[in-house]
Amino acid sequence: MNIGQASDASGVSAKMIRYYEEIGLVRPPLRTESNYRVYGSDEVHVLRFIRRARTFGFSIDETRALLALWQDKSRASAEVRDIASDHIATLETKIAELQSMVGTLRHLVHRCHGDNRPDCPILDDLAGPKGH
Amino acid sequence: MNIGQASDASGVSAKMIRYYEEIGLVRPPLRTESNYRVYGSDEVHVLRFIRRARTFGFSIDETRALLALWQDKSRASAEVRDIASDHIATLETKIAELQSMVGTLRHLVHRCHGDNRPDCPILDDLAGPKGH
DNA sequence: TCTTGACCTTCCCACCATGGGAAGGATTAC
DNA sequence: GTAATCCTTCCCATGGTGGGAAGGTCAAGA
């Protein structure tokens, strides 16, 4: 299987497959005589795992850790759960930040009449204290 | 006022002030004979505006637009409100994505007993369909 | 007056993850 | 045999931010 076929089979772009190889996230595959990368179903399986981890928002390093645990038959599930729990906490922090932004902005938009008149509480708020 | 003092007064790092100048977000300030940048309270005010826009998650380009509107006394508030509304929608999309990730992960973490046994539904899910 | 330390300048590099594209070789289909 | 499609490596861009080097400037204190 060439890199293009592995890409189709895994959903990971050829560019990214090469990049993952470069950073050591996946092992360098065998090559043909003409230097083409050759993949098998095991490699595709790994790539799919990576893709799914990435869609869950795990960083490359977290993905690397999960991958190592996945391939370590004797690991404790607690290790995996810790990584996932930490990641949930990170995501929730991010969500709270975004919600805080949205809350403030919605309030400002609500107070901005949004017509042809120039005064606008959104800009006033961004500009800071009125006492300037 | 030197760049360091402008940084302290605005909360924008000196690095970033130079960067904003480079990308044309702020005008190049006057220079002393020895080539030091010189800032006044107007420039600091602009920098504070930028900092606040950034903390609301507006991109540099959105910030640029808001800044232009802020400095255009005759603009319609509707323009400002549109930028803010679009930004709220973007943030909400992002929030929804993150919440979806969290939802799935929480479900998986809940089902993972997290002890010394190796089997773990989190990894199983990342690995994909069982039929491999 | 001289030194020292804190400031400023420009320039380059790094991050993270991804995509674009060029130049050139290999394979495949007709 | 030729054309289209694939592969290879290499460089560049993104968006914002920080780190740091090499060298010039300024202010305060001995």
Image (tube, coloured by chain):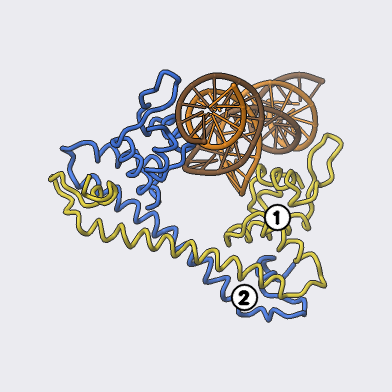
Chain colours: A blue, B yellow, C brown, D orange
Residue B63: x and y in percent read: 68, 59
Q: Nearer the viewer, residue B105 or A125?
A: B105
Reply above or below: A104 against A54: below
Residue A51: x and y in percent read: 38, 46
Please name the residue shown 32% across and 51% down the image: A86
Q: Which of A38 and B50 is in front in this view?
A: A38
Please name the residue shown 56% across and 74% down the image: A106
> What is the spatial separation of the Cα atoms under label 1 and label 2, in whole angstroms?
22 Å
Mark 1, residue position: B47
Per the image, label 1 sits on a secondary structure element best described as: helix
In the rendered image, the residue lying farthest to the left is B117
Residue A109 circle label: 2
Report whether mark 1 lies on the same chain as mark 2. Answer: no
Per the image, label 2 sits on a secondary structure element best described as: helix
Q: How crowded is mark 2: few (under 14 residues within 10 Å), some or many (20 or more)?
A: many
In this picture, residue B7 sits left or right of residue A50: right
Residue B108: x and y in percent read: 25, 57
Residue A10 position by quadrant? top left
Chain letter for the residue marked with disc 1 in the picture: B
In this picture, residue B15 sits left or right of residue A14: right
Residue B106: x and y in percent read: 29, 60
Tell me the mark number nearer the camera, choosing from 1 and 2. Answer: 2
Residue B102 position by quadrant? bottom left
Which quarter of the image is occupied by the C terminus of chain B? top left
Q: Residues within 10 Å of mark 1 (few under 14, many from 20)?
A: many
Reply above or below: B87 against B105: below
The amino acid sitting under disc 1 is Leu
The amino acid sitting under disc 2 is Val
Please name the residue shown 41% across and 58% down the image: A93
